[in-house]
Image (tube, rainbow, N blue to C red):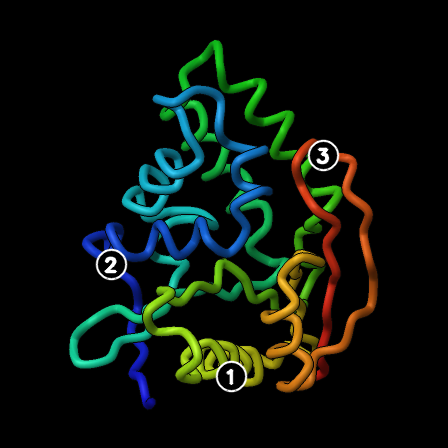
Amino acid sequence: MKVEFRPAVSEDAPVAVPLIYSSGPAVLEYAFTLTKSRSALGFLEYGFRDGAGEIGYRNHIAAVHDGQVVGVGACFSGDSSFRFLLSGIRQVWSHYGVLRSPAIIRRALKMESLIKPPDGTMHYIGHLGVPREWRGRGIGRQLVEHFLDIGRHANRPVAVLDVSVENERAQSLYEHIGFRVTEELQSTLPGVPDHRRMEMRI
């Protein structure tokens, strides 16, 4: 099934946010859920609609079929890390408030020991999600290949992504595209599985 790609917009949030969440629910729950009213999904919605930073809509691409969003994802390089950090801190402080924010920031920094930010010109691919009813139709593969093309046009030599050891289906897809596991990182975070870093020269 062929899909088209377009920049995500704020109005995509009802579909896009659950898909971003599905790309790493255990990690996101650990980092961003404090209470029922201050949950990971709530923060993702706030950050996506805000538009800025790693989780903002401006950093995402929507895959569309017959006018319907059937996939979402993001790609960026290490050059964005500082800008994303500043946006993330602002979003955390705005969403969680002064008293709760330090705990969230500490968790997010611990999360980076498992899912490392990209270095320099690395082309990082993440936040990939396809609705359950649309899976198995090649949408995930088209998303990844679209992001690889973006990396090639930006002259980024290596594409990088992270995958949970529990997500064997996703790892199999990435291996068929050409990614190879370069590192397995053991999780010390409660409820969060180990992760594998995968790379591919582009």
* Identity, as a three-letter code, of the amino acid under mark 3: Leu
CA–CA distance in space, label 2 to label 3: 33 Å
Residue hosting label 2: 9
Q: Secondary structure at mark 3?
A: loop
Residue at screen point 38% across, 65% down: 132
For the point 63% across and 29% down, the residue is 107
Say whether residue 47 is left or right of residue 12.
right
Q: Position of residue 22 (x, y in %)?
A: 46, 53
Would you identify the image quadrant in which residue 167 lies?
bottom right
Question: Label 1 sits on what residue type?
Answer: Glu
* Mark toward the start of the polypeptide (3 vs 1): 1
Quadrant for the C terminus, please: bottom right
Tag nearer the camera, 1 or 2: 1
Residue 136 location (% of width, % of height): 44, 79
Q: Indicate the position of residue 128 as horizontal and vertical percent values.
A: 48, 64
Sequence-wise, the earlier of marks 1 and 2 is 2
Instruction: Bin the neighbour count of mark 2 within 10 Å (Cα to Cα): few under 14, some 14-19, many 20 and up.
Output: some
